[in-house]
Image (cartoon, rainbow, N blue to C red):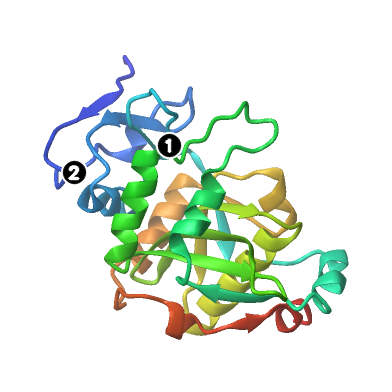
Amino acid sequence: MSLQLFELDADPASPFPPVELALSDPDGLLAFGGDLSPTRFLNAYRSGIFPWFSEGEPILWWSPSQRAVFRSDGVHLPSRLCRRLRNSGWTVRADSVFTQVVAGCAAPRAGQGGGTWITADMQAAYLALHRLGLAHSIEVFDAEDRLVGGLFGLSFGHMFCGDSMYSGESGASSLALAALARRLRDWGWPLLDAQVPNPHTRRLGVEIWPRADYLAALARLRDLPATPGNWQERFGQWPASALASA
């Protein structure tokens, strides 16, 4: 049987091809083209698909055979980091500086050749989703109230799909993840999608699920009642000392 990479049509509401038809090499590549409209974006994430491409490439859509997933009660901060955070004066908030967090995640990092997958078009797409109350940022501030790191992602139903995180100061992204997981657990949301594993998320407790298991869980959670909107008040403010003492 020949393998096929699907081209999406111009209608953002058109369905994606079945994820089982994604390529095995490269793992999970399913389709190309389409656009980054909120409708297309949300349809993709609700189907277990996400965009990932570099500047100058067509929009590429992925659903890997193995999925990185955190349980909301399964994020564990290293003990050395906890000791440092207890007296850091850091705090965690949500949705107060969304564009700055996305820009921080998009900034080129050492060892990545100066490139980023969070292109200007992707940043605009995430901002559009944020304005609709669907994309959220979790933000870490130091004792002088300066942004030192965070993460962002997409929320629907009882599901949060993380897209990227960054640390301007060591440990900031880990703290943002721990705060998000704690809040999701409080809300009764059991999972946090991390897309693909990396050494950093492995140290924090990520699990690797077969795609079928992730899709089954996603199907149970994506349509549960939830109200889109800004998370500033709902998320509240977390002192790092409380998260590091848990």
Location of the N terminus by quadrant is top left
Image vertical order of residue 110 relative to residue 220, above or below: above
Identify the mark nearer the N-term, 1 or 2: 2
Tag 1 and tag 2, C-beta contact below 8 Å: no
Q: Quadrant of residue 87?
A: bottom right
| Residue 230 point in image, percent of width and height | 37, 75
Residue at mark 1 = 52
| Residue 205 point in image, percent of width and height | 69, 59
Image vertical order of residue 109 relative to residue 141, above or below: above
**132 sits left or right of 143 in the view:** left
- The residue depicted at 45 percent of the width and 63 percent of the height is 98
What is the residue that sits farthest to the top in this orientation?
2
User: Does dot 1 land on a helix, a strand or a loop?
Assistant: loop
Q: Which mark is residue 15?
A: 2
**211 sits left or right of 143 in the view:** left
| Residue 74 point in image, percent of width and height | 65, 68
Q: Amino acid at mark 2?
A: Pro
Of circles 1 and 2, the one toward us is 1
Separation of marks 1 and 2 at Cα, in angstroms: 18 Å
Image vertical order of residue 223 relative to residue 202, above or below: below
Q: Amino acid at mark 1?
A: Trp
